[in-house]
Image (spheres, rainbow, N blue to C red):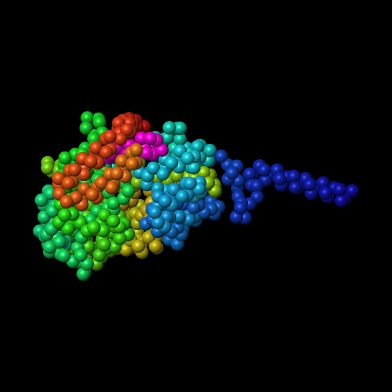
Amino acid sequence: MYKMRKLAMLLLALMMCWTLAACSGNTGTSSNGKPKEADASQTKPSPDEPAWKLDTTPITFDWYINFDWFTSKWGGNVVSDYITKKTGVSLNFIVPAGDAGEKLNTMMAARSLPDFITLGSYEDSALKMINGDMVLPLNELADEYDPYFFKVADPAKLSWYTQADGNVYSYPNASSSPADYQKYGELFTSNQTFLVRKDMYEALGKPDMSTPEGFLGALRAAKKQFPEVDGKPLIPIGMHEFTETGNYSLEEYLQNFLAIPQQKNGKLYDRRSDPTYLKWLKVFRQANEDGLIPTDVYIDEKRLEKDEKISQGRYFAMLYQWSDFTEINQNLYQKDPNKVYIAIDGPANDAHDAPTLGGNGVSGWTVTLISKNVKDKKRAIAFLSYLLSEEGNKDLFLGEKGVTYDTIDGKDQLLPEVRHLLNTDRQAFDSKYGGSYLYWMLMDTNLNLAWMEGMDAEPAKQIRDWTKGKTISMSEFENLDPDPTTKEGIAEGKNTRLWAETLPKLLMSGSDSEFDKLFAEFMNTITKEPEYEAIAASRQATYERNVQKLKLSLNQ
């Protein structure tokens, strides 16, 4: 009888424990063995609270970056270690060893995409992944697992990237909507610059290079006065590499410096046929004939080779994206402030209108997508929301409060010694601290304007300041090309590759008349394409939709 009574009491006690446990929501321990107040999977996410806080157990995501020059690792610096400690997320970056397009195409063909994918917003692979049902809709993930996403994501960007099925599959970085331009426009800068080596330019008497005669005269004078740099030939003019789609420097950059419109009276304008543009392409043709453009520019001058030549100070002038060599220019400045590259007025139209330089558009620089193969949907969308939020951007830019930054004179800014290292040795800064968007995949360049205090140091300041007031939004002209899987898209791709083949031939032609003949042949070929009119109609319709989308975004 005693034993039965004792057993009954034990059972009652156990039942009370179970009841208390059920009422309190404490269901035991988490996967890492620690007590937890509630199972994250049982907790309904709130639209007012970040979902990443519901589960901070360790997890590692594979993240593909479609740029072979990206060499950063996660872990071992303040920012990445702090974010991992805070969110539980670690990252394993995957980058292409060779041709980025080939690597990505191989993964898509095998449907073996990693958890996250980041690639250029201008690349058609994103649309191929979407149409191929390889990536997940961010809005559906947010609805189910993290409604806070809609609180931190920009409605204008979500609207811009909404597909025909009503879903959003990608989110951009370095993106600015028309509303952002209204708010921050005067502070916006452009990457599109014409640069010269300061000491050489001053030694030549600071020539005016905005006219064809002044441009060619300066290049010839530089080659004559400075034939070699440390025993290696001077390169009078440098530019971006020639690719299978063309050359940034000789297309968009040159056209923007010449302030050539992209539309006239609401109709898209083919800037390639503009007389002023063709006139300046002939200037580059003459530069090539005069031996001012070395042949390797057309063949194998990739970014790494170009970086090496910039670090050696071998270019006199460049029509180039200055942010690509910020660290190199900083190193040059440390050795000799006179041997750095500075921005000056470059090629201009006959009226000397100010350049219309491209700033951040609503499409952004890159886009990030979440693969259908993702190992944990909840954690993935929650981490994406965190990264694109103000909190995440602040962590990525400034790091950990009290360690890399603090509130100084009422503003959150890097500590003086941290800022000093950033301004004097970017490589050492990246290795030790990892801030200032070393991890740029979801960076919001509008938000970082609030944290730039004391960070505008030379030589970058001079270049950045030169572009202020010349930078405009061109969002309405983004993503105009037809779907690459359609007849029009395939034909447009063919035309683009033909232009990419024609452009270097124009520069290497033996005379202006030969140039004219080659250009006429190109135009004749593409205009006789059966899809030519359909391509033009598709681009015009997309442009008009873009205009309407952007107008609506201003009213949101």
Q: Residue at x 35, y 52 (%)?
A: 412
Q: Is residue 426 magenta?
A: no
As for residue 484 lying within the magenta part, the answer is: yes
Horizontal arrangement in the rendering, residue 379 relative to residue 552 (left or right)? right
Residue drawn 44% across and 49% down? Answer: 104
Given residues 361 and 111, the one toward you in this image is 111
Residue 338 occupies quadrant: bottom left
Left/right placement of residue 430 relative to residue 234 reads right
- Find the residue positioned furthest to the right: 1
Q: Residue at x 23, y 49 (%)?
A: 505
Residue situated in front as seen by the camera: 175 or 57:
175
Tally of marks: 0
Q: Position of residue 55 (x, y in %)?
A: 55, 48
x then y, percent, for residue 122: 35, 43
Q: Quadrant of the C terminus?
A: top left
- Magenta stretch: give its range: 472-490
Residue 497 visible in the displayed image = yes
Residue in view at x 26 percent, y 62 percent: 309
Image coordinates for residue 267, horizontal then vertical, percent: 25, 31
Q: Position of residue 110 (x, y in %)?
A: 50, 48
Q: Is residue 317 left or right of residue 139?
A: left
* Image quadrant in which you'd find residue 542: top left
Q: Which residue is farthest bottom?
A: 231
Q: Please say whether residue 402 is visible from this viewpoint.
A: no
